[in-house]
Amino acid sequence: MHDSQAAIPLAKITSQRVTNLYDLMDAAYDAEAIKEDSRRRGRVPIIDSNPRRKEKQEMDPASRLRYNERSIAERLMGRLKEEFGGSHVKVRGHRKVMTHLMFGVLALTADQLLRLVM
């Protein structure tokens, strides 16, 4: 199953747990049904346009700024997985897994702080 097929059911679950104003998604989620569902839930869909479907549409500056926040989170999660052990969890049990990941987050934070200093 492609991630976009789970977007609407996950949005429903999310709306029961948190209140959010925006749905930030990449071009793989560029479907009218997803955008309409987002609007129906009272959110603003900020979804990058898929150039394979139509001509690439530029976002307005406010949407672009919000979308870039999503990109920052994606890069951090990617670094956690690739450089700090997030994809190589060798323990079982939610407490051990959480501890393993939190050590990775701690190391990633230290690395980011060192990058600011140097």
Image: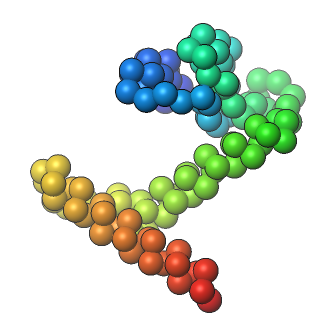
Q: Looking at the picture, does residue 98 appear above or below residue 12? A: below
- Identify which residue is drawn at 44% across, 78% down: 110
Q: Front-most of 93 and 66? A: 66
Number of dots carrying numbers: 0
Give percent across and percent down for residue 68.
69, 49
Query: Quadrant location of the N terminus?
Result: top left
Examine the rendering and report whether any part of residue 34 can be seen. Answer: no
Question: In which quadrant will I find the C terminus?
Answer: bottom right
Residue farthest to the bottom, as pictured: 118
Name the spot of residue 109 as percent of width and height, x first.
45, 71
Please tell me whether residue 47 is drawn above or below residue 110 in the rendered image: above
Q: Residue at x 30, y 63 (%)?
A: 102
Identify the residue shown where x is 48% and y is 56%.
Answer: 77
Residue 69 at what x, y percent from top left? 64, 49
Quadrant of the image occupied by residue 44: top right
Can residue 68 be seen here? The reply is yes
Residue drawn at point x = 62 percent, y = 30 percent = 22
Q: Position of residue 6 (x, y in %)?
A: 45, 23
Toward the front, the furthest residue is: 19
